[in-house]
Image (cartoon, rainbow, N blue to C red):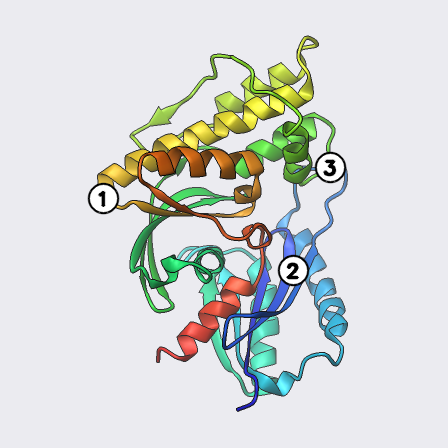
Amino acid sequence: MRNRYFMGIDTSNYTTSIALIDDMDNIILDLRKVLKVDKGKKGLRQQEAVFQHVNNFPELFNSIGEQIDFNNIYTVSCSHKPRNVKESYMPVFRVGRGQALIMSKVLKANYYEFSHQEGHIAAGIMYNELKDKSEFLSLHISGGTTELLLVNRKNSDFNIDIIGGTLDISIGQLIDRIGVEMGLNFPCGKEMDDMSKKGNVLELKIPISIKDDTWFNLSGLENYFKNLLHDDKLIAEDVLATFFNSISLYLIEIIVKASKIYGINSILITGGVAANSTIRKLLQKELNRVNISVYFPKIELCTDNAIGIAYLGKVKAFSR
């Protein structure tokens, strides 16, 4: 039997992605192009992101060259909206949906649609035992989202309920706002992570605002750490080490409470912020200590990608 490939396409707020996996979930192709954000800006407007996605696709497809036989593509899947609920919509996802639909028609391949959030979850479970679990918790922490989720799964179909998270800005927004305040280029997370590894956690009374067990606010934390950055007695590396430690404490507290409330002791941590070294280390250590099993995707699968979407297309094709 010839090799079969499963294509995924994702057009998020900040990355154009194309991926191919095979029958054994080997990654055959993982192409991504991060959208450009001018220095000093904190993000992109939707029309700016749409324009860049449209320009990125010819470049990405052209880079594939002749290394892939497109006739072997069995499914073409895309992320067509942020979340799997009726009212969820963002213009950026229309670009990827259009490309995927055209590709599927030209190749006479099966076509499937999933949400961007489902893609993140799928990329997080495809290489561990969570792919065999029908129920688990998931925490999606990224530039646009900080949501604690209750996930019920049957094959490629997810029923996802938001059971906690932030009530104001996301953790990713908080990180980038602090980074931009420091004069770093957006997105700032990777550079801040590297800097924080050189610092020590300060013994300070950090304002923690947990509401209703699993919900919290971050605006107070933003103002607190912006003030610390302008304190000449402190060095930036120590402030950042303390900053990421504080974020971790928020997350640990809501995860432990959710685990007790729902009686579930497995959690998947996804999204770009899940690549942060401090957050990965502390959550793994502290949650394991209270018998909660923590699963992180590989670092390269934390940030926006199309691999999870490709995987869901493969599962969908064989579960009909």
Image x and y of residue 204, in percent: 51, 12
Q: The residue under label 1 is which amino acid type?
A: Gly
Looking at the image, which is closer to me, 168 or 188?
188
SS class of the residue under badge 3?
A: loop
Q: Which residue is mark 1?
A: 263
Q: The residue under label 2 is which amino acid type?
A: Thr
| Quarter in which the C terminus is drawn | bottom left
SS class of the residue under badge 2?
A: strand
Q: Are marks 3 and 1 in contact (CB under 8 Å)?
A: no
Q: Which residue is mark 3?
A: 185
Image x and y of residue 255, in percent: 35, 37
Q: Residues within 10 Å of mark 2 (few under 14, many from 20)?
A: many
Above/below status of 6 relative to 253: below
Q: Quadrant of residue 107?
A: bottom right
Looking at the image, which is closer to me, 149 or 278?
278
Q: Residues within 10 Å of mark 1 (few under 14, many from 20)?
A: few
Disc ID at residue 16: 2
Sequence-first disc among 2 and 3: 2
Q: The residue under label 3 is which amino acid type?
A: Asn
Sequence-first disc among 1 and 2: 2
Image x and y of residue 104, in percent: 56, 81
Residue at 52% x, 43% y is 274
Residue at 56% x, 55% y is 301
